[in-house]
Image (tube, rainbow, N blue to C red):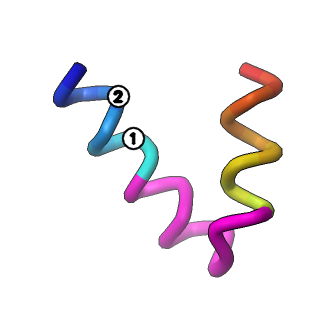
């Protein structure tokens, strides 16, 4: 679970927005 949370934060940081990161994470 912790690794998943870290991956969320990394994706949000890379995408620059929570909505884009959410879309990307829901696909995977």
- Looking at the image, which residue is at 24% across and 28% down? 3
Q: Quadrant of residue 28?
A: top right
Indicate whether 12 appears above or below 6: below
Q: Which residue is mark 2?
A: 4
- Looking at the image, which residue is at 17% across and 29% down? 2
Q: How far is mark 1 from mark 2, CA to CA?
A: 5 Å
Q: Which residue is mark 1?
A: 7
Q: Which mark is residue 27?
A: none
Q: Position of residue 11 (x, y in %)?
A: 54, 54
Q: Main secondary structure of the magenta part?
A: helix
Q: Which residues are magenta?
A: 9-19
The foreground one among 14 and 4 is 4
- Looking at the image, which residue is at 39% across and 41% down? 7
Membership of 13 in magenta stretch = yes
Q: Are marks 1 and 2 in contact (CB under 8 Å)?
A: yes
The foreground one among 17 and 14 is 17
Helix, strand or loop at mark 2: helix
Helix, strand or loop at mark 1: helix
């Amino acid at each position: 679970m912790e690794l998943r949370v870290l991956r969320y934060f990394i994706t949000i940081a890379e995408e620059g927005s929570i909505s884009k990161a959410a879309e990307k994470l829901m696909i995977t």
